[in-house]
Each structure stands twice: as C-alpha cells, then as structure tokens.
Image (tube, rainbow, N blue to C red):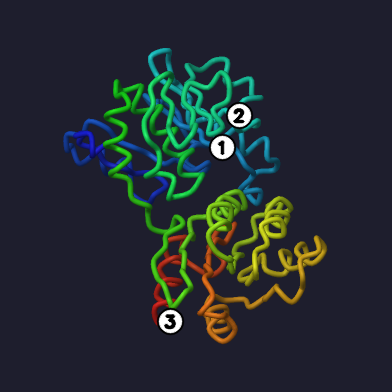
Amino acid sequence: FRALGYKTAYAGNIGISYAEIVASEVHLDVIILELSSFQLEHLDTFKADAAILINLTPDHLDRYETVEEYYAVKWNVFKNQTESDIAVLNQEDKNITNSEKIKSLNTLMFSILNKSGSDFGYVNHQIRLYTDMCDAKFIEQFGTHNIENFLAICGVLYHFGHRAKDIIVAQEAFKCAEHRLEKFHTYHCVDFYNDSKATNSDSTKQAINSLYKRQDIHLICGGKEKNLDFTDLVEMIIEKDVKSVSLIGQTADRLEIQLREAGYLKEKIYNLSTLTCVLDFLKMHLNFNHPSSVLLSPATSSYDQFKNFEDRGWIFKELVKEKF
C-alpha cells in the first residue's frame, strides 16, 4: 500500500496497538491489522472493509476445547461486513470452502493452483487477476506460502481499484519480514533461517516446503505445549528427508516420541532443551563445507522459554552470530 502512495499503518497482533493509532489522530488512508483469535473473540461493532482468511489449521488447543471452536472464532474477522465489503478467501483450503459461513459474504477467491472458479490464480510463473496477468518471479523466491499471501493481497488491492500494473509495483516493494523465513546469516556453506513466527505446525511445514529443494535442512523445533497434533509435520519431515531435528522446549519429548514412532531415525533426533545447547551441538557436528540450511521453525508458541516469538527470534540470531 505504501508503494502505491497510500498513507498507512499496521497494528494488531503484530504488537502495535490499533487504539493508539486511532487516538493519535494522524490522517491515514488505510490501517492494516493482523488479528489473532484471542483478539477476534471480542469483536463487537468493528468492521473490516476488506478481510483476509488465508487458511484454517489447528492452533491454541490449550485455550479452545475443540478445533471447530477455534475456527469459529477466526471467522469473526468478517463480522459486521456488508455487501460493499470484501472477504478474500483461499480456495485451496477445504476448511474454508466447506463452511456455510461463505454464503453470507461478498467473496473473492484465490487459488495457487489456478483452480476453476477462482478469481485470482497462479500459472506459469504469473499471477492471474481474472483475465489480467502479471509476472510473479520476484515473489517466488520467498516461497510458495508467500505466493498465497501475495494472491490474497492482490484481492484487496483489486477491491481498491488497482490492476496488474499497480500490483507489479507493490510486488517489487515486498521484503521478507523479520522472523518469517528470514535468511540472516551464512557460515561457510551453511545458511541460517529465523522462522520464529512459525507458531503452529502448518507454518513449519510451509518453511520446510520452501527450502527442501534448495538445500539439506537441519530443523530446530519445539516450544510451548498447546496440545497441537504434529502428525502432518512429522510426516513431512520424513517425506522431505529433513537431515536432522533438534528439539527444544515443552514439546520436545512428545515430538521425539512421535518422530521415532513414525520411523524417523533416532540418530537424527537431538533433544537438547535450549537454543544454546542446540547451536553448540551443531557447531561441533555439522559439515560446514556442505550446502545446507539451519532452520529455526518451532511449530508452536514461545512462552515456555521466551517473552514472545520476536524475543525467540532475536535471541536465536544473536546466538548464531556469536557462535558462527
């Protein structure tokens, strides 16, 4: 939005108060909010002119009794919308498309597989906006999940009257955000990625999927126990031949058990409790002349050992630069 000339600010679960921005009385064209389920529980009269739901995957089952209860809260992002507002939805996600809640919304559907019936798609390295096309090679370097993210943003920009030529300008302004599959350091042939924002298993799966074709992956995983099901993540770790998994935090023991029961070699699992111990171990055992990635992508929250995901990411980056 800034690249297209809007005066804008972002707030919400990112850590900046929406109320403080409103109270500042600074003139803005657009305010962009990231809203957590905890915040969405309490919406009353708030209405979004454009709202996005990129996917629905289980999370926070230490707070919600069922995954269905959690999903219902996430749908509150569309609460109070009218016919003049837009709901941007991912056609690839069956938990979204199978919901009866879609029927009451003015929807715009995007599909990374360019599915029939989608308004926006992705085909042959191009983003399709109805029949209009724009190059997507720039955004591809940031991973498949960011193509989905960008398709969603295209929906909002389109709703605000922008077409492909404008969206290309916005795409070229994109930078990978801190703590989100952030490549921040290289030591000999080994790249280090900070994906501390991956607070559920689906986010970690996206990170693995983005990197596995490029280099061998040494995954650092674990954190606060949220009663999440790690079955799909374990299956992907095996399927994508992740070279090692170093475990930290409250979920470490449970993840180790699931990995071993699924057939992942115990010699590739290192239950080391803390980031400091993990990095000390990797410094002693990794082959730094072989191209590979060390990926912190925890698949759960940080609050067992850190203040928040940012704190976890900053500490990881400081430790890496200190030791490597």
For the residues labelled 3 and 1, say whether their Cβ atoms are less than 8 Å apart: no
Q: Position of residue 239 (x, y in %)?
A: 71, 56
Q: Is residue 275 visible?
A: yes
| Secondary structure of residue under mark 1 | loop
Task: Find the residue positioned furthest to the front.
Answer: 124
Q: In whole angstroms, how far apart are the C-alphas of marks 1 and 2?
A: 7 Å
Q: Is residue 110 left or right of residue 182?
A: right
Q: What percent of the width, then of the height, locates residue 161?
A: 29, 20
Q: Amino acid at mark 1?
A: Asn
The residue under label 2 is which amino acid type?
Ile
Earlier-in-chain disc, 3 versus 1: 1
Residue at 59% x, 38% y is 56
| Measured Cα–Cα span from mark 3 to mark 1 | 36 Å
Q: Which residue is mark 3?
A: 324
Q: Looking at the image, is mark 3 or mark 2 nearer the viewer?
A: 3
Identify the residue under disc 1: 55
Relative placement, left or right, of 157 versus 42 is left
Q: Residues within 10 Å of mark 2 (few under 14, many from 20)?
A: some
Look at mark 2 in the image and give the residue it sits on.
96
Query: Which of pointers 1 and 2 lies earlier in the amino acid sequence?
Result: 1
Residue 46 pos. (x, y %) = 40, 28
**Above or below, 157 relative to 189:** above
Element under disc 2: helix
The kind of residue on which mark 3 rests is Phe
Q: Which of pointers 3 and 1 indicates the residue nearer the eye?
A: 3
Question: In the rendered structure, are the residues bearing label 1 and label 2 in contact, judged by CB atoms less than 8 Å apart?
Answer: yes
Quarter of image, res 92: top right
